[in-house]
Structures are given as structure tokens and as C-alpha cells.
């Protein structure tokens, strides 16, 4: 029933925008971009933080008129950075945290732009990459673990700011092509060509990067870090082909394909594999 209601809702929104594009094109483009770039969930309230995050040391990092919410679990000098995905926040790492603590590392998690307690209303990958860059400048992690579009942001960070101090990367259900993300959104709402063309142009203007050129599997050809890539064969959010493309182009890659875990990839066996990867020399 929920799926049917969601289907009716998104198609209704798309129908409205398509009609509006002939009456008030600019308004239609603005609304379409807002739906694409502004998360509808994932925000947190400081007074009602999940207990998992209450147990962390918190800090705010200022960067380019933004406030990046950071959470820290103190360990040794080795630092792991956790980067969540769309419409989520740092609390998504609750289940894997006991496993990561086995490494003895200091663990840092951040909230993405317009997510958790971080500032902003709009989310885009290049901006998220700037959040990652600011955090890495401050804490110099040796490892990034990223989920979903957080993986794309982490790869864009490495593309823009090559970092030889970063040794390992873990990508969980991460997309490769920005074009696919936008095309899926256009398809979901059944947007007409007028809106679709403008949405791509507006996204390129905001991202300051050509959509067709944004490709993790192309960026990763020059990456030197060891990477562990996990993707589920039944991922309904990011197709498994995306993870395979990245694994084939990243020189030093380990790829594992799960079944039945979906996009979230929460699984004790997978967590143990990640810890083994992290502890390898």
C-alpha cells in the first residue's frame, strides 16, 4: 500500500510540474530542482539526538559559511572517517560501530549538507566533497567508509584533492554516474524534456561540473588507495552494475557482492569483512 501511495504521489508531482512548465517554466524548473536537491528526511534535532550520537564527542567545523556537524569516538592515532548517504545522517553507522571499534581507531562521522545537524537546505555531491575535505584537513584519516552517494562524494573529493595520506576506502552501495542519478529522478517523476534539459543545466551550473563527465569509475582509474567495494545484487536504489564498474576501474580493489541486504548493506558478516580489510597491512 505504501508503494502504491508513493507511486501516485510522485507521478502527481511530475504531472503538475509538466503542466506548470508550459504556464510558468521558471517556477517549474525551480520546484523540480528543489525536489531533486533538498532532502525531505535525515535532519536531526540537537535536543533529541539518537542515544548513539549522544555518546560521541561532538564538534562543529566551519567551512565556507557552512557548519559541519562532526561526531567523534576516541581511540588511537589511526582515524576512520564515516560518510553517510542521501536522506540519512551519522546515526546510520550505529550497527557497524561495535565492529569498527575492534580496530582501536578513532572514528569520525559527519552529517552531510542539509542532513543531521549540519547547515543548509540543499545537498549536492561537490559540496559534500568540500565537507569531506574540511574534515580530512583537520583530522587526517587513513580510511574513509562511505555509503551510497556518500561514496560518490568521497570519490569526487579524491579526484579534486588527491590525498596520498589516505590509505583505504570502503564503498557501500555507491553509484558511479551522476547522469544515472538525475535520469532516475526524471524517470521517477516522468518529467518532460523541457524540465529535464533545464534540470541538467541547472545541476551543472550548481555543481560546476559536467554531468556526463561525473563518473566515479573514470575518476578511480588514477586512485592509488586500496578499496573494498560491497554492493547487493538486489539493490533497488543503486544498481549493482554501478559497483561493478567502479571495482573494474579501481586498480587496487576488492569487490564483494551480497544477496538480500538491499541498499542499506547492514550485515554482521559484511562488517567482519570490512574490519579484516581495515586491519590488513
Image (cartoon, rainbow, N blue to C red):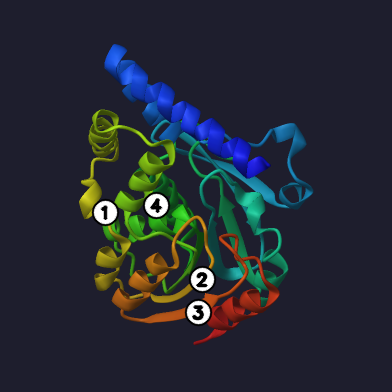
Q: Quadrant of the N terminus?
A: top right
Q: Secondary structure at mark 2?
A: loop
Q: According to the image, label 4 marks what residue? A: 133
Residue marked by disc 1 = 214
| Residue annotated with mark 2 | 233
> Which residue occupies the foreground of this view, 183 or 49?
183
CB atoms of marks 1 and 4 within 8 Å: no
Q: Secondary structure at mark 3?
A: strand
Question: Whole-Å distance between the Cαs marked 1 and 3?
Answer: 24 Å
In front here: 93 or 87?
A: 87
Q: Earlier in the sequence, mark 2 or mark 3?
A: 2
Give percent across and percent down for residue 149.
45, 53
Report whether 204 appears left or right of 140: left
Return the disc, 3 or 4, that comes first in the chain's sequence: 4
Specify the quadrant of the image occupied by residue 96.
bottom right
Residue 66 drawn at (x, y percent):
45, 34
Labels 1 & 3 near each other (Cβ < 8 A): no
Determine which of the numbered discs, if any, sits on residue 275 in the image: none
Residue 26 visible = yes
Horizontally, residue 158 falls left or right of residue 189, namely left
As measured in the structure, the alpha-carbon distance from the residue carrying label 2 to the one carrying label 1 is: 24 Å
Separation of marks 4 and 2 at Cα, in angstroms: 31 Å
Query: Element at badge 1?
Result: loop
Amino acid at each position: 500500500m505504501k508503494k502504491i501511495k508513493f507511486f501516485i504521489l510522485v507521478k502527481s508531482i511530475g504531472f503538475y510540474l509538466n503542466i506548470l512548465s508550459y504556464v510558468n517554466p521558471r517556477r517549474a524548473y525551480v520546484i523540480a530542482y528543489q525536489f531533486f536537491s533538498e532532502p525531505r528526511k535525515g535532519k536531526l534535532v540537537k535536543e533529541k539526538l539518537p542515544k548513539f550520537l549522544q555518546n560521541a564527542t561532538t564538534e562543529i567545523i566551519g567551512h565556507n559559511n557552512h557548519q559541519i556537524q562532526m561526531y567523534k569516538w576516541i581511540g588511537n592515532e589511526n582515524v576512520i572517517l564515516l560518510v553517510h548517504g542521501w536522506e540519512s545522517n551519522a546515526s546510520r553507522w550505529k550497527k557497524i560501530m561495535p565492529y569498527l571499534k575492534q580496530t582501536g581507531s578513532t572514528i569520525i562521522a559527519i552529517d552531510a549538507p542539509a542532513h543531521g545537524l549540519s547547515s543548509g537546505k540543499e545537498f549536492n555531491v561537490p559540496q559534500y566533497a568540500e565537507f569531506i575535505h574540511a574534515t580530512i584537513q583537520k583530522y587526517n584519516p587513513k580510511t574513509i567508509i562511505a555509503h551510497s552517494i556518500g561514496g560518490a562524494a568521497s570519490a569526487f573529493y579524491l579526484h579534486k584533492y588527491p590525498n596520498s595520506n589516505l590509505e583505504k576506502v570502503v564503498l557501500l552501495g555507491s553509484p558511479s554516474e551522476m547522469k544515472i542519478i538525475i535520469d532516475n529522478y526524471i524517470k521517477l517523476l516522468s518529467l518532460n524534456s523541457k524540465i529535464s534539459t533545464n534540470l541538467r543545466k541547472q545541476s551543472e551550473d550548481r555543481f560546476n561540473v559536467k554531468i556526463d563527465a561525473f563518473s566515479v569509475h573514470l575518476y578511480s582509474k588514477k586512485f592509488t588507495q586500496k578499496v573494498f567495494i560491497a554492493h547487493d545484487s538486489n539493490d533497488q536504489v543503486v544498481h549493482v552494475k554501478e559497483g561493478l564498474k567502479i571495482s573494474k576501474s579501481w586498480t587496487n580493489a576488492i569487490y564483494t557482492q551480497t544477496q538480500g541486504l538491499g541498499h542499506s548493506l547492514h550485515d554482521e558478516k559484511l562488517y567482519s569483512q570490512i574490519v579484516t580489510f581495515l586491519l590488513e597491512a
